[in-house]
Image (cartoon, rainbow, N blue to C red):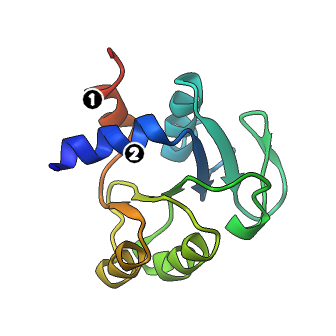
Amino acid sequence: MNLDQQIIEALTKYKRIAVVGLSPDPDRPSFGVSQYMQSQGYKITPVRPGGEVILGEKAVESLSEVSQPVEIVDVFRKSDAVSPIVDEAIKCKAKVLWLQEGVSHPEAEERARKAGLMVFSDLCILKEHARLLRNR
């Protein structure tokens, strides 16, 4: 299966996205990307300290606090913060690890793959959704 087919499979099969590092600032990429995904029918759970409400959803401190099963973990953090996030994603039995543009961590990505997660690295989930699925 090529990359486009894998992306299509992940984004059609899974509809719940835990967004690690979702900012409440409308000018931040994480906000715009999450708002778009929400508009496309995805359920967003913000994962960030502070417990504020972002895009109408109450933020949780960590992936382990997400009340519903985690399907996609979308990471808006620096690459050096990815390893513990991957450990949490594996622990909560996430299905997909999505590292946004500019974010990669080869060792952590390999751990995620070995644990059975689909892994997308250094890609924007909004751009890929718009490119492959928006007009379906």
Q: What amino acid is found at the position of numbered circle 2 in the picture? A: Ala
Horizontal side of 100 relative to 66 (left or right) equals left
Amino acid type for the residue under numbered disc 1? Leu
Q: Position of residue 58 (x, y in %)?
A: 82, 46
Q: Nearer the viewer, residue 9 or 37?
A: 9
Residue 116 occupies which quadrant of the picture?
bottom left
Extreme residue toward the top, this view: 135
- In percent of width and height, residue 2 lies at 15, 49
Judge by depth and name the residue closer to the eye, 51 or 98. 98
Instruction: Give the camera-side residue of 63 and 90.
Output: 90
Q: Quadrant of the C terminus?
A: top left
Q: Indicate the secondary structure of the residue bearing disc 1.
A: helix
Q: Is residue 132 above or below residue 28?
A: above
* Residue linked to disc 1: 132
Among numbered discs 2 and 1, the one appearing first in the sequence: 2
Q: Which residue is mark 2?
A: 10
